[in-house]
């Protein structure tokens, strides 16, 4: 077995051990470059990968290598920079610097003044296994925008810290020190800027206005779904920034491959850099987040109260903060806060799995995930965009709620129950074979169970 084959078989096994996003991120552009005595040397594209791989995956990689060839006892990583796809960065001219003053798109100004939340800094951002990949990626991007991973694509459910994470790039020390220009914009505003540029025939000056920017952050890019003209222009904007090694950071509520009605070429651009997810924090992390929030406000609450919130408010971080704020308001007026009062006050926040996973919730979540209306799922159509979500809804009714097949068939307009059986088996099997589907199912389930 030569080095390439050896590495291929390591990669094949790594894929089963870590998530797709992690795998794509950390193992892209890696290879074994030598095997000396008992030591394997692996080349990685940058310092960031090196650090991450040697801290997180060293043991696992070594174990896999050792299982294949037991003479291998040690492992090291070296950095082998990738040739830059384009050297346009070096040619950014003085004329572009003066254009800075002309950055006149109102959307950006308004955004910069009002939308950026100065509270969003790296200091008050709690990192745990639920978001550490996204966090590390954002730091790497702040450190050398345009060079590590472009674009950086962060996805996850609502209230899990995407906006916080990407806005803080603006205030991050490295960005400030290096005088990097960061612009944050919501995708609604970005789309409306594109639409107005198309209308006034000023696409070129719109693009020019972006050129002084080093890091362009677009929040909630999933809203571009179905907006064909905007997608087309965005594709060109994207390319022109990318070619100049400008950093692009995107957030979305789902991964690129699950955004419906997205042009393939944009999808492949989105997938071309690093994709990192944020998920739900666990109990311990929720407790740390609560304590961080209190510290920020310089207030104390009894440990018992904090533990109650952390144990019961599980939907997302926004709700966690909401629950805390509600108690703080009460506390301010009433001074004492006993656990019985807390329970009463937080009724609306408390999560109960039995309340959330019902049929309505499954239908609603699946429809929303695929940008469909709920009634579309019941359309008697064979269109691919509908058939798959419908099969997934049937699958989840069976798997999560133990509905009988005839009951599922009744739910879906009296279809023959063999249709329900077929849907269940098909999704079950595809789930085994297709990572993309597994990822989608996980996200959907996460959303169903997060209330
Ligand atoms: P999203 O954009 O994913 O919907 P936000 O970034 O708006 O979520 O986060 C919701 C709230 O939770 C914000 O007030 C944010 O400050 C807070 N928050 C999210 N993640 C964290 C974290 N890791 N540490 C501290 N606060 C967080
Ligand atoms: Mg957000």
Image (cartoon, grey):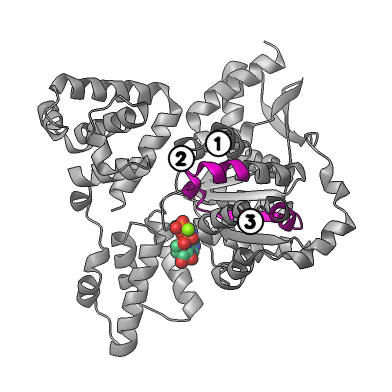
Q: Is residue 441 left or right of residue 348?
A: right
Residue placed at 76% from the left, 58% from the top?
A: 212
319 falls in the magenta region = no
Q: Is residue 66 left or right of residue 222?
A: right
Where residue 259 appears, x then y in whole percent? 46, 40
Regarding mark 2 in the picture, which secondary structure is present there? loop
Q: Quadrant of residue 366?
A: top left
Residue under numbered circle 1: 267
Where residue 414 appears, x then y in whole percent? 11, 28
Q: Is any atom of residue 200 visible in this view?
A: yes
> Alpha-carbon distance for marks 3 and 1?
27 Å
Q: Nearer the viewer, residue 262 or 205?
A: 205
Stretch in magenta: 206-233
Residue placed at 63% from the left, 55% from the top?
A: 197
Regarding mark 3 in the picture, which secondary structure is present there? loop
| In this view, the mark in front (3 or 1) | 3
> Alpha-carbon distance for marks 2 and 1?
8 Å
Proximity of marks 2 and 1: CB atoms separated by less than 8 Å = yes
Where residue 117 appears, x then y in whole percent? 55, 70
Q: Which mark is residue 200?
A: 3
Dot 2 crowding, Cα within 10 Å, few <14, some 14–19, many 20+: many
Where residue 235 appears, x then y in whole percent? 62, 41
Residue placed at 76% from the left, 20% from the top?
A: 37
Q: Is residue 291 above or below residue 408?
A: below
């Amino acid at each position: 077995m030569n080095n390439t084959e050896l590495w291929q078989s390591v990669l094949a096994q790594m894929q089963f051990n870590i998530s797709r996003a992690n795998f794509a991120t950390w193992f892209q552009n890696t290879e074994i470059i030598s095997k000396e005595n008992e030591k394997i040397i692996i080349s990685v594209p940058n310092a960031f990968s090196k650090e991450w791989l040697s801290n997180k995956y060293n043991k696992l990689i070594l174990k896999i290598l050792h299982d294949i060839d037991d003479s291998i006892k040690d492992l090291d990583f070296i950095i082998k920079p990738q040739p830059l796809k384009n050297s346009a960065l070096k040619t950014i001219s003085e004329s572009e610097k003066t254009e800075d003053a002309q950055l006149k798109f109102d959307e950006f100004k308004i955004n910069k003044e009002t939308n950026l939340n100065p509270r969003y800094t790296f200091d008050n951002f709690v990192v745990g296994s639920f978001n550490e990949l996204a966090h590390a990626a954002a730091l790497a991007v702040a450190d050398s925008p345009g060079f590590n991973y472009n674009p950086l694509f962060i996805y996850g459910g609502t209230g899990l810290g995407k906006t916080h994470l990407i806005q803080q790039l603006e205030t991050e020390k490295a960005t400030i020190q290096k005088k990097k220009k960061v612009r944050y914009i919501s995708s609604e505003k970005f789309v409306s800027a594109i639409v107005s540029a198309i209308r006034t025939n000023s696409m070129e000056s719109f693009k020019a206005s972006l050129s002084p920017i080093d890091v362009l952050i677009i929040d909630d890019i999933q809203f571009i779904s179905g907006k064909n003209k905007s997608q087309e222009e965005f594709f060109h904007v994207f390319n022109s920034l990318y070619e100049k090694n400008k950093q692009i950071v995107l957030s979305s509520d789902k991964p690129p491959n699950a955004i419906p009605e997205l042009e393939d070429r944009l999808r492949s651009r989105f997938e071309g850099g690093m994709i990192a997810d944020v998920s739900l924090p666990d109990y311990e992390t929720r407790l740390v987040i609560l304590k961080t929030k209190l510290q920020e406000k310089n207030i104390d609450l009894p440990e018992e109260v904090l533990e109650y919130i952390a144990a019961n408010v599980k939907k997302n971080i926004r709700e966690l903060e909401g629950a805390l704020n509600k108690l703080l308001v009460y506390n301010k007026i009433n001074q004492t806060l006993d656990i019985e009062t807390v329970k009463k006050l937080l009724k609306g926040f408390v999560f109960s799995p039995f309340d959330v996973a019902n049929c309505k919730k499954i239908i609603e979540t699946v429809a929303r995930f695929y940008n469909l209306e709920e009634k579309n799922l019941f359309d008697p159509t064979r269109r691919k965009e509908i058939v798959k979500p419908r099969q997934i809804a049937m699958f989840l009714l069976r798997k999560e709620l133990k509905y009988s097949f005839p009951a599922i068939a009744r739910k879906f307009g009296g279809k023959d129950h063999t249709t329900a059986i077929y849907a269940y088996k098909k999704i079950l099997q595809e789930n085994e074979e297709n990572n993309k589907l597994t990822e989608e199912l996980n996200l959907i389930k996460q959303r169903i169970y997060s209330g």
